[in-house]
Image (cartoon, rainbow, N blue to C red):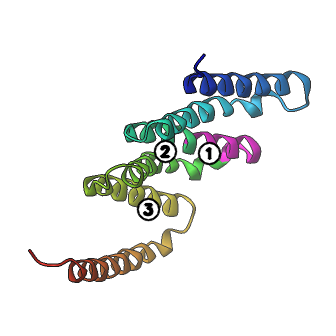
Amino acid sequence: MEFKKSNLIWGLFLILIGTVLLIGNLSRVSMEILWPVFPLTVGLAFWIGYFHDRKNHGLLMPGSILIVVSLLFFYCNLSGWGRMETLWPVFIMAPAVGFFAMYFGGEKDQGLLIPAGILFGTGIVFLIISSGFGDYWPVLLIIAGLWLIISQRYNQKKNQEQPEK
C-alpha cells in the first residue's frame, strides 16, 4: 500500500486546526487571539504545496500574502488594534513579499522584481509617513540611490564574468 504525500499534508493540517481549537476551548487563550492561525495555516499550506512540487511557484504568492497578513493580525491582537492606524501599509507590502518569493522560488524572472519593488517601496513610504517619521523620508532616496549604484556594480561584474559569444 502506497502512502500519499497529500494524506500527510491534510493530516498535519487537520491536527494543527484541531490543536488550535482545543487550546481555544481548554485554556485562557481565547479564539479572539488565536483566530489568525487559520489564515496562517492556509498560507503555510500554499507554501507546503510549493515545496511538494517546486514547479508550482505561483503558490508562493497567496501563501506569502496570507502569512504576512496573519502575522500582522497576530501582532495587532497582542498589542492592540490601534496599531493598525500606522501598520496598514503592510497590506501593500504583503503582495511584494509574494512577488519576491515567486522570484526566488521560481525561474528568477526579472519581471517579478518590478512590481515587488514598487509595492514594497510604496509600502515603506506610507509606513514611514504614517508612523511619524515623515521628516526622514529623504532616507528612502538615499537608500534608492545606494541600491542603484550597488545593482549597477553587480551587473557590471556579472557581465564581465560571462564570456562573449
- Quadrant location of residue 11? top right
From this view, report whether residue 87 is shown above or below residue 43: below
Q: Which residue is mark 2?
A: 91
- Is residue 70 part of the magenta span, yes or no? yes
Assign the C terminus to one quadrant of the image: bottom left
Closer to the camera in the image, 34 or 55: 55
Magenta residues?
69-82
Quarter of the picture holding the N terminus: top right
**Residue furthest to the front:** 1
Looking at the image, residue 30 lies above or below residue 61: above
In the figure, is residue 4 to the left or right of 30? left
Q: Position of residue 22 (x, y in %)?
A: 83, 22
Secondary structure found at label 2: helix
Give the image location of residue 139, x and y in percent: 45, 77
**Crowding at label 2, few (<14), some or many (≥20) Cα neighbours within 10 Å?**
some
Q: Amino acid at mark 2?
A: Phe
Looking at the image, residue 87 sits to the left or right of residue 115; the answer is: right
**Left or right placement of residue 80 versus residue 47 in this view:** right
User: Label 1 neighbourhood size at 10 Å, few (<14), some (14-19), many (20+)?
Assistant: many
Q: Are marks 2 and 1 in contact (CB under 8 Å)?
A: yes
The residue carrying mark 1 is 72
Crowding at dot 3, Cα within 10 Å, few <14 / some 14-19 / many 20+, comes out as some
Query: Is 41 in front, or is 47?
Result: 47
Q: Position of residue 62 (x, y in %)?
A: 45, 36
**Residue at left 21%, top 83%?**
160
